[in-house]
Every structure is written in structure tokens, then in C-alpha cells.
Image (cartoon, rainbow, N blue to C red):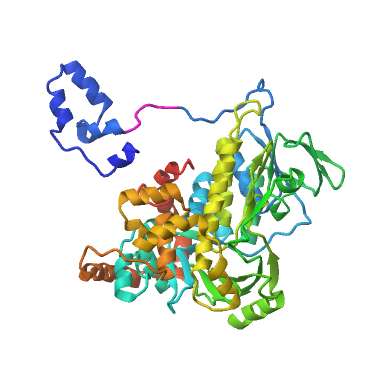
Amino acid sequence: MDHKALKRGLAAGPGNALDRLLGTLPAQDAEAVRSWLPGPGGATEPLALLETLAASAGDVVRPDDSTPRAVRRVGVIGGGTAGYLTALALKAKRPWLDVTLVESPQIPIIGVGEATVTYMTLFLHHYLGIDAEELYRRVRPTWKVGIRFDWGPHPDGFMGPFDWSSDNVGIQGAIAATGTINGATLGSALMMADKAAVYRTGDSPTSLMKYVPFAYHLDNGLLVSYLTELARRRGVHHIDATIADVVLDGPEWVDHLRTSDGRDLGFDLYVDCTGFRSQLLGKALKTPYLPYSGTLFTDSAVTGNVDHHGDIKPYTQATTMNAGWCWRIPTRDSDHRGYVYSSAAISDEEAAEELAARFPGISEPRVVRFRSGRHEKAWRGNVMGIGNSYGFVEPLESTGLMMIGIEIQTLVSCLPASWDGPQVRETVNTALGQQWDAIRWLLGLHYRFNTRLDTKFWQECRNSADVSGFQPLLDVYAGGAPLSRRNAFVRDMLDRVTPTFFGLYGIDYLLLGQQVPTRMLPMDEPPAAWQARRRAADALVRAALPTGEALAVYDAHPELHRQLLQDEDSWAGTRIAERLGML
């Protein structure tokens, strides 16, 4: 039981039990207690007894010149987002490390749009210390307030906003009043209107975006170009080379790498960012691979861009297609589209034709192959796999960059000063494996219950997509929803039995959005109360700016970035970043 969490929201009143007790103690003793438990305005705060008041140094150990088998030289093998984010994180959090990124000029960057989740906003700006103004100028991100799903039986689909845990308008009321979950939060209402919570108020704008969680849409080509320059500025060494051979010293240890032009490269730690090739973790160390093909049937994507004529949506869109689904990722210049499909259900040519017919004017298609699954372990010996070299799932919930960030944060937090000291590899492997598996089951729910189309592909998904890892959630959901409104003990039980990546709120939106049968919990308020909140949310939405105009306001007013990232009452501020271990 976390007593510090229980303490939140409490406040000791004047003349409390501690104050009365101090009145009976000798003056010297009473003053000692007051100094120990100070409160606002010179009062004494008994609730401070539930806080951590003792100071403790950090747990990072830096090797010195006498440390045997010290970890000082790190080779990040492979570029792209995984490689450059890893190198930047190591330099930001372990500045004494000598970090070298080895990148083959023969392997191109996949230049498609990338959608992220809110975690990445904090990771980029707080963990890596990337300046927001510079990122907006160089990479030109757009905002993602959530995901719009053209999914399930309702013709309008459903919104999955990032502020779903607030339930600030009400998901039960939305279903009762409209038959959908749409409009259950301010974020959802903004998505429905294609707006952002930014307002023109006199000479200076007002932004409420620090109260509306959002992520970024990123052009991968611009992002990698910027990260490459940033890594150089921050002291990351760079070697252009193609790795021809991985020379081992035992079954779980890399001695050195040999390049195609005959050079030998040696490091203390090797971070495998070689993508699906998994050149070190998979091929050289022969780490077993665990496919997710029993749940996720797609293995290909055909991509292209469509002009949006300045109409920038504040969300990622997932549209049901005959043999899979199509993403829309809005960038400043165009919408990036990608049809994710099963090659067993449709040919590449048929997929490209379906995409072009659905979205006229799309650019010349490009086919991408992938596999969904993970290796049995991320960390073996002196090799850690990050990104696609360790695990990947299709991009339905934008978890790719998020998992790269979490894997990086895990590596940096657990990196030993010496290979002779205690190691936590198996703890890391278990934790990361559980997180990947939870994402597998989450994505499985999208396929198992989507009734939008009745093609052969979707029939097979509904009949056989394995969601067994989340069966306990489904059993409890069938007896009463929303899960996030079940009693506290049931919620705690579910969090322990089937931990989910986006929490019970995310499961609620996914199942209720697809109208999976359940017994709805009764509302404990009259319908008029929900209607009043909805009218208030609609008032804020009406006054808000379209997303493109709101982004231009942020470009012109850098103080809005500082409000978002520094204000104590911001979802992306320093207090939240510290709680997530990013500061």
C-alpha cells in the first residue's frame, strides 16, 4: 500500500492532533518536531509523516580509472530513430561515456510519418533535453490529441483521446445520450471539431494545451536528420561502416565487430539498433524469436502521401480496410497514409489499388515488410537490443517510438559501471517482455472485436485472433463496464492480473467504442448533469482555433512551450517528468 498516494488530496486542519500534542511537550521538544514537520504559514504538518523526508544520493555509479571491466565505450550499431535516440540518451544521462554510432550508408531511412504517444513528448524534451522551439522549427511536428478509429459498428467510429482517464465530460453519459463514446472528454470534443485548445485573446494568445495531453506526429526523415545533427553537436562519434561479421568471445559475449572494409571495432557495450536484421542480438547471439502471428495477422504496408490543403487533423486516424487498416498521420505539408495488410489475404498490387481508390491523389506507393513479435530477451551479455532489432508490432496504437524510449530509459537506468558487478539483465528482460506482450494483447482486441467489415480477413480475425492474455479483463468487462468505474479492489485486481499499457481507461475506450456487449454500470447523476458538462466543453471547443492556426500560434509564441514543459500544473511539466524518472 502506497501511503504517500493515500495522502494526496488530504489536508490537516488547524488545531489538529499533532498541534494539541505539541502544546503539552517541553518547548525544546515541540520546536524540534515543528522543524521536522513544517507546514504552510509556519504551521505544523502531521501529514508530512507520510512523506519521504530523508535525503538519498542517486543510484548511478560512475567507473573510475581502477574499475575492472568498466563500461566506458558504447557502440550503437545502426542509425535511424532507435540508434540516434539511444546515443543521445547515453550522452545526456551518462556524459562520461564514449559513445560511437556505427551506421551503414547503404541502408536508407524509411521516410514515413511517425505517430507517437504522450510519453514521447516528455521523453524528447525532459529526458533528452531537446529544445522545443528548435524541434518545432527543424522537425515541424503536428499535434496528436488521440486516435480516431473508423472501426466498429457505429458509422462515426470512435475517438480514443489521450485525456481518457479524466472522464471530464463522462463516457457513460455520452453512451446514454448519443449511443457512442465520442465527446466523453474535452480532448474527444476537440478531435471531433478538428481543433486544438489554443485561443486568440487580445494581444497575446491563451493555451490550455497543458491541460489536454497530446503527442507528436513526426516526419521520420526530418526527425532523423535533426537527431543526426544534434548527436554530432553533443559529442557522439560517428562511423560510416557496414558490419560484415560479429566476432564472439563465448556464447553471450561480443568481442569485436569487423566491417566490410576490414576494420575491427571494439566496445564495452554493444547496442543493437540494426532493425529487423537484428544483426547482433538475433543473428550473432541466436536469441530465439517469439512471433505474435497468432494474434496479429498483418505483415506488410503500402505507403504514400496525400495533400491535405492545409487541413491538419489533431489526431491519428485508423480506417478499416478490406485486409487490414489504413493510417493517416498529418504532417505540416501532407497526410501520410499507409495501408497495413496481410500478404496472405491480398497482394501488394491489390493493396496499392485499394489504397489509391480510397484516397485519390495519393503519391507513388512504396511497400514495407515487417514482422510482429519480439526476441526472447533484449539483453544478453554485453549486447542490448533496442527498437526493431528486439521487438516490433504493427503501428495500430503508435507504440513503436514509445517502446524505443522505454527500452532506452531501461538500459540507461540499469547500465552497470562494470561487468564484474551485480547485473540485472534478467529483470530487464522480464519487464520489457511483459510490456511487449501487453501491447500484443491490446492490439488483439482491435482485431477480435471489429465488426466494421465482413471480408474474409476480418472474419478470420474475429474467429481466431488470440486475445487470451487479456481474457481476465474480458471476463470482468462482460459483467460490468466501464472497468475504470468498478470498485477499487476490482481495479487493483485487474491491474495485477493483467497489467495493460494504457490502463483500464484504454481498455474501456477500445471495448465500449467497438460496442462489445456488457452490462453498463448505472449512472449516479441525472442526465442534465452530463448535458451541462457537454455544453461547457462545447463552448471551449467553439472558441478554440483550428489545429493549423494553433500550431502557427505556438511557432510565433515560444513562451507557450515553456508553459507546457515547466509549469507545475502541466501534464508535461517537470513534476510529471520527475515522477517518470526523466529528470
User: Where 18 sits versus 404, above or below?
Assistant: above
Q: Is residue 133 visible?
A: no
Counting from the top left corner in percent of width and height, residue 52 is at 35, 31
Q: Nearer the viewer, residue 543 or 65?
A: 65
**Magenta stretch, main secondary structure class:** loop
Could you tell me which residue is drawn at 26 percent across and 65 percent down? Answer: 522
Q: Is residue 380 left or right of residue 215?
A: right
The quarter holding residue 325 reads bottom right
Q: For the view shown, which residue lies furthest in the right direction? A: 262
Which residue is more in the foreground, 293 or 272?
293
From the image, which quarter does the N terminus lie in?
A: top left
Residue 351 lies in what quarter of the image? Answer: bottom right
Q: 92 above or below 405? A: above
Q: Specify whether residue 422 is painted magenta.
A: no
* Nearest the eye: 565 or 150: 150
Q: Is residue 260 left or right of residue 550?
A: right
Residue 210 visible in image: yes
Is 442 displayed left or right of 299 in the figure? left
Percent across and percent down for residue 105 are 77, 54
Q: Position of residue 481 (x, y in %)?
A: 35, 62
In this rendering, the count of numbered labels is 0
Q: Residue at x 70, y 71 (%)?
A: 366
Measuring from the top left, give residue 98's x and y in whole percent: 68, 35
274, 435: nearer the viewer: 435
Q: Residue at x 40, y 72 (%)?
A: 192
Q: Which residues are magenta?
A: 51-56
Residue shown at the point (45%, 59%) measured from the top left: 214
